Image (tube, helix red, strand yellow):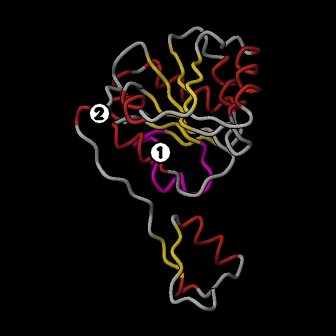
C-alpha cells in the first residue's frame, strides 16, 4: 500500500475492506468493477421458456453454499424445474450425495468443468449463485449478459451488480426460506423472469 500510487479493487465492498484493514490511504484506493465483453445474440437466453432450467456455475468448495441451495430446492419439488451445476472441486461427490439425500438426485445434473459455459447458461431460465463470500463475481455478470434473472447470496460486491427486484433477487447468506421463496416466485412467473 505505501509504495503504490493507486490500488484497484473490483468492488466497493473490497474497497471498504481495504480501508478498514489500513492497506493504504483512501485517496489511493479506487474501484473498477469487473467487466466482460458482450456475446453474439445466438447465446442469449430465453428466460420465459418452460420447463425451467436453473444453472449455477461454481466450484465445489467451502466458499460456495450448495447445501443451502439443495435445502431450498427440496421445498420446491412440486414445481417443474431442473438444475445444472457447472464446475468441479473437492466437494463434488459429497454434494452429489447431499442432493440425493434431499431427493433431488434425478433433477440435478453435475456437469463438471466445461468449455461451453456460455451455451449452457443461455439454455437456462434462472441463474443462481448461492455462496458464503465473494468479491465481484464474473458469474453474475455472465448470467445477466445472457439475459437471465439472477438469484444470489447478498455477500461481498454481488449487490453492486445484481439489483434486488430489478435484475434478480438478493438473498441473505444461508437463508433457506428466503432462497426458496425467491426461486419459487421466479419458477411460477415467466413474465417476471423475462422482466428481470
Q: Tell whether 9 sits left or right of 193.
A: right
Q: Where is residue 156 in the image (x, y as percent from the top left)?
A: 61, 56
Helix, strand, or loop for circle 1? Answer: helix
Tell me the crowding category of disc 1: few under 14, some 14 to 19, or many 20 or more residues within 10 angstroms, Cα based: many
Helix, strand, or loop for circle 2? Answer: loop
The dominant secondary structure in magenta is loop
The Cα–Cα distance between marks 1 and 2, rounded to whole angstroms, is 14 Å
- Quadrant of the image occupied by residue 107: top right
Q: Do the residues labelled 1 and 2 touch (CB within 8 Å)?
A: no
Relative to residue 41, is residue 73 depicted above or below? above
Residue located 59% across and 18% down the image: 108
Relative to residue 174, is residue 13 depicted above or below? below
Part of the protein shown in magenta: 153-168
Q: Position of residue 57 (x, y in %)?
A: 54, 36
Residue 158 painted magenta: yes
Identify the residue position indicated by label 1 in the image.
140
Residue located 54% across and 21% down the image: 83
Q: Tell whether 183 sits left or right of 105.
A: left
Q: Where is residue 167 in the image (x, y as percent from the top left)?
A: 40, 42
Identify the residue position indicated by label 2 in the image.
44
Relative to residue 17, is residue 165 depicted above or below? above
Residue located 53% across and 67% down the image: 12
Q: Who is closer to the viewer here, 189 or 89?
A: 89
Amino acid at each position: 500500500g505505501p509504495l503504490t500510487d493507486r490500488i484497484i479493487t473490483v468492488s466497493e465492498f473490497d474497497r471498504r475492506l481495504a480501508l478498514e484493514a489500513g492497506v493504504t490511504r483512501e485517496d489511493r484506493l479506487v474501484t473498477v468493477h469487473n467487466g466482460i465483453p458482450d456475446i453474439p445474440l445466438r447465446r442469449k437466453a430465453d428466460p420465459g421458456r418452460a420447463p425451467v432450467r436453473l444453472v449455477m456455475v461454481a466450484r465445489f468448495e467451502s466458499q460456495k453454499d450448495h447445501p443451502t441451495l439443495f435445502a431450498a430446492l427440496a421445498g420446491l419439488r412440486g414445481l417443474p424445474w431442473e438444475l445444472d451445476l457447472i464446475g468441479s472441486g473437492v466437494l463434488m461427490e459429497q454434494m452429489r450425495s447431499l442432493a440425493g439425500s434431499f431427493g433431488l438426485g434425478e433433477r440435478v445434473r453435475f456437469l463438471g468443468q466445461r468449455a461451453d459455459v456460455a451455451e449452457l447458461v443461455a439454455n437456462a431460465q434462472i441463474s443462481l449463485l448461492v455462496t458464503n463470500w465473494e468479491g465481484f463475481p464474473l458469474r453474475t455478470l455472465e448470467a445477466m449478459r445472457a439475459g437471465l434473472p439472477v438469484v444470489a447470496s447478498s455477500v461481498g460486491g454481488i449487490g453492486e451488480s445484481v439489483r434486488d427486484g430489478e435484475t434478480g433477487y438478493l438473498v441473505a447468506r444461508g437463508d433457506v426460506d428466503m432462497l426458496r421463496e425467491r426461486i419459487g416466485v421466479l419458477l411460477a412467473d415467466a413474465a417476471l423472469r423475462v422482466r428481470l
